[in-house]
Image: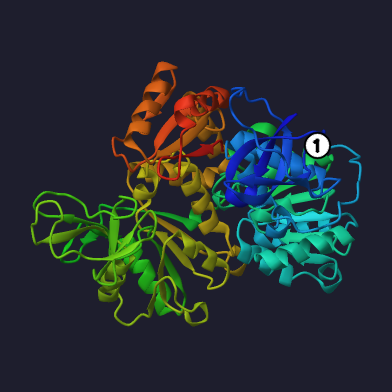
Amino acid sequence: MLVDVSVPEIGMDSLTYRTDRELRAGLRVIVEVKSTKYTGFIVGQTAKKLPVSIEIKPVEGVIDEEPVVDADIWDLAVWAASVSMCGMSSALKAALPHSVYTGEKISPPPFVEASGNFTERHCFNPLDSERVKFFLTELKENVPTLILFPKRDEAKSFFLNLPDGLKQEALLWPETPEKLREAWKKIHSGEVRIVTAPPGGVFAPLRPRKIIVEDESSPFHAIPYTMNLSARSLAGHRAVYLKSELILAGRVPSLKTYIRSKPREVLKPDRKNIILADIHQSRKESLNGIEGTILLTNTLTSRTHKQTASGRNVLWLLNRTGESSEVFCENCGESITCPKCGSVMQSRNDGNILRCRRCGNLREVPSKCEKCGYPFLQGKRPGLEALAKIAGKYFPDVHIFTEGSDVSTMKGLILSTSKGLELCGTVNPSLVAWLDLDSEIWLNDYTRRFNVFRNLIESYWRGRENDPERKLLIQSRQKGMKLAEFLSRGWNAFILDEIRTRRDFLLPPFGYIIEVECSSKILREELINLFMNDGIFVMDSGVDSEPLYVNSQSLESVKKILSSKIFLRNTKKNYINITVRSD
């Protein structure tokens, strides 16, 4: 009998072995890969058509007589591997503690048959305090409950603020392998009824009767990068399998949730608290050595003066870190790129260091252009470091803070990327200003418009209970203004507009976008030809270091091409990376 075995420790897709007896899916076995023995999981009988001449290695031993992974987690890993095309090994590695997929002797989980019916409810209230009250009410019901947050800090804060009675029954999902294994043991022993977790906790072996997903439309719910699936989607699939209750919450629903169940909008922003600044009454500020300007409208500077003079905090948002977003040669126009991944690099620390915008690699600024040898390099598109210098000229008597400053000392003007939205509940800004909304929307990503709107909603509502009169100021031109105008109309109007656009172009959730990275130029060209010959549209930037983007309504047709013979020869030096985007 030939069986497929997944080996999470080495991250390869399922390998085929022979066995003289039937082995159930989910059993851990010992197999040999390149003369080294590993723990693997039986996936099932192989469907591969292998030549008779190939020598098949045997399964060398069986670790367990019963599967040690909960049935619902195994089912979730199988489903995730299929829809994300990441492979069963990657899915199991994300789902299980290190000790489980490396062979530690553990007892099988107790069998509990799923009962009841799957149901879905919502809590889309923009006020944080109202959602917290709702969550606490749900947790008081005496049933196993899993509550997921998009970021670990949010999960931790909620856990620490639980009432003592609930906290005794709860567990904060850990990060380290040692603590993760201990968490599994505690949950299987019945000591834990509530698990509070970041997205990775969707695999907690709790068998929850209730799964709550907070801020379910957040892009930070993607887990992990190899899957690129939202914890919301994983939680939904798991809740259906367990016949449990799924509760989706947040300020704005995802498109998938809206299309499926059309949740009700309970509050809309007040138009009087939204300021659309007139960009025709503004100054264009720049720094020597950096091409491009930062626009400061008269409305922005006057309102910032007024608020800081009265001792209030003001938050300016600009999603460009460093001194400039790019460094290029004045002579040939060639940008300085990363020696590791080939992406454009930004300047930092007064132009003394370069940082890759893609992989984070650091390097010194070259003394001359690496293409033509010209000695003069220039920055392009000023970022937060440049903004801090410009703001200092306008507000010489105001303390100016940037990302990384101690939150407890922040009193004055705070400059940040969209990460600064987390400060809205702590530093209580009376004015939040988006300095360049157009550049946010301009980025080439089909999710960008939705995520920018989410950020606008968050900058209006987050922590608003502390200051109901907080103003939201937006500097923008035509596209940004159109998006901002949806604020007072509410997310219902915006989502309907976004759905029409996505449906017209067959973008997720009405189709798939598959990102394909190729280490070899030859593989890249062969892959493009295969897709085009099969009638599948491929978006190619022409830059070998950039991914190919495949737009398709069917994953099966893409899987067929990617499993074709020419791609079975992939090695560490000759590989493809696949990321499926379906949200």
Give the amino acid type for the residue marked by disc 1 in the picture. Leu
Image label count: 1
Residue 120's place in the image compared with 395, above or below, is above
Lateral position of residue 489 relative to residue 68, left or right: left
Q: Looking at the rendering, in which quadrant would you find the N terminus?
A: top right
Where is residue 144, by image quadrant? bottom right
Where is residue 355, by image quadrant? bottom left
| Image x and y of residue 54, in percent | 59, 28
Q: Looking at the rendering, in which quadrant would you find the C terminus?
A: top right
Q: Is residue 368 visible?
A: yes
| Image x and y of residue 493, in percent | 55, 37
Lateral position of residue 47 relative to residue 390, left or right: right
| Image x and y of residue 482, in percent | 41, 41
Q: Is residue 124 visible?
A: no
Q: Nearer the viewer, residue 6 or 88?
A: 6
Residue shown at the point (46%, 48%) measured from the top left: 452
| Image x and y of residue 544, in percent | 31, 39
Lateral position of residue 396 relative to residue 117, left or right: left
